[in-house]
Amino acid sequence: MNGRTTFKEFAATEGNSAWEALVARPSALYSRGDDIRSAFARDYTRILHSRAYRRLKHKTQVFFNIDNDHICTRMEHVAHVESVSNTIARKLELNDELTKAIAFGHDLGHAPFGHHGEKILDELSRKHLGIAFWHERNGLRFVDKVELLEDNYKIEKNLDLTYAVRDGIVSHCGELDENGLRPREELIDLETFREAGQYQPATWEGCVVKIADKIAYIGRDIEDAASLGFLEEAQLEQLRKMAQANDEKVLNTTVIMHNMIIDICQNSNPTDGICLSRKYLEQLNEIKRFNYEYIYKNPRFSAFQHYAQLVLTEIFDTLWRYRGGDVWQKIGRERKYYPTLLSTFSEWLAKYCETDFVPDGELKDRAERCDNIKIYGRLENERVYAQAALDYIAGMTDRFAVKVFEELLTY
């Protein structure tokens, strides 16, 4: 630690002056008298058991390759971020339970088809809602208002995560070339976030996850690109030279990641923040530029991008036809044509509309098992309906989006 103070006195633990605010929840959770978990450990398990987390295993990280078991998915990326952040947090004597919960929840707001799917939903959101869609903000929306878990009596309720975990999710944007990350001082209302990276996390643990996110994705994206033949020999040679700039023994990306983790642990301190040394920061940014030039902007993604655009916009446009008037009746009339799409969407609406607005039968029974925030009310206007359709699509896996799109092709 360069002879300086560790982060122990600044960790998000009971000795922290902001502790009560950091562990505060939107609503009280049901209690178990014999529970041995901390507040953050409980958040971790609530995220782990959520449907949004399960769906990450079939969501694109970078490469749409749903039948290749060895290509990184969003779930695997989350595990990588947890591994990197946990190692750093333990060494710096921060709260590793908090970093674990933030890491596992940080990408719950991602759309199907990776960042390109995010761009498509952003276009739809700007058009129909007048606001931007970005996965960090959508992640906060999902954990606050969308994701549900059963309580002891099989009633589904909102996740109600702690402030510190919710904050880490909405503020984790790692796209900016920053170093020396320091937490912001004010515990602001998280609804005030208006763009990615607008504010730093409120905790040192959130800052660790933010830098771990970047370290985790640049390494694995290169491995996948190489295995899929995205990189020519000249580019691989260029990569080898960049990789060995600080360590001539480097043979693969895992060693680069290891070196950066150690560098962060050696150079971070409460004065300078969570940081890399200059040489490793330069290497990180150089590799990131390489990835953008030869991987993320590779013309081989063109067909995938067109396909994703078609799939997601056609699903939205189909759902848009049922807006206004008696939505349930409209959907009911055409459910035979699109059974998977319309059955699952009507069930989605039932969970988040006022219970007395939901028609009697199976949908009403489903609604009555949910004691949650009724974010769609009574579908009062087109804007609310558009939000419902966008939430529904944002939660899809790649596989499910493809499945319901193919259902549309059957007429």
Image (cartoon, rainbow, N blue to C red):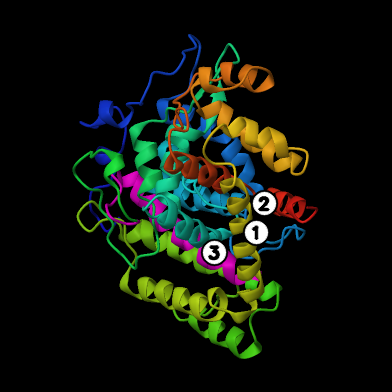
Q: Residue 338 got which mark?
A: none
**Left or right: residue 15 compared with residue 215:** left
Residue 91 part of the magenta-drawn span = no
Residue at image x 41%, y 26%?
A: 39
Q: List x then y, in percent, for residue 267.
A: 31, 61
Residue at image x 34%, y 33%?
A: 163
> Mark 1 vs mark 2: which is more N-terminal?
1
Q: Residue furthest bottom?
A: 234
Q: Amino acid at mark 2?
A: Ala
Question: Does residue 134 appear in the picture of this structure?
Answer: no
From what the image shows, is residue 231 above or below residue 125?
below
Q: Amino acid at mark 1?
A: Val
Q: List x then y, in percent, for residue 251.
A: 60, 75
Q: Are marks 1 and 2 in contact (CB under 8 Å)?
A: yes
Q: Residues within 10 Å of mark 3 (few under 14, many from 20)?
A: some
Residue 197 part of the magenta-drawn span = yes
Q: Residue 401 got which mark?
A: 2
Mark 3 sits on what residue?
116
Mark 1 sits on what residue?
311
Q: List x then y, in percent, for residue 308.
A: 62, 63
> Mark 3 vs mark 2: which is more N-terminal?
3
Instruction: Provide the secondary structure element on which disc 1 rests.
Output: helix
> Mark 3 vs mark 1: which is more N-terminal?
3
Q: As rendered, which of 376 and 53 lies closer to the eye? A: 376
Q: Which residues are magenta?
A: 196-224
Q: Amino acid at mark 3?
A: His
Residue at image x 75%, y 39%?
A: 339
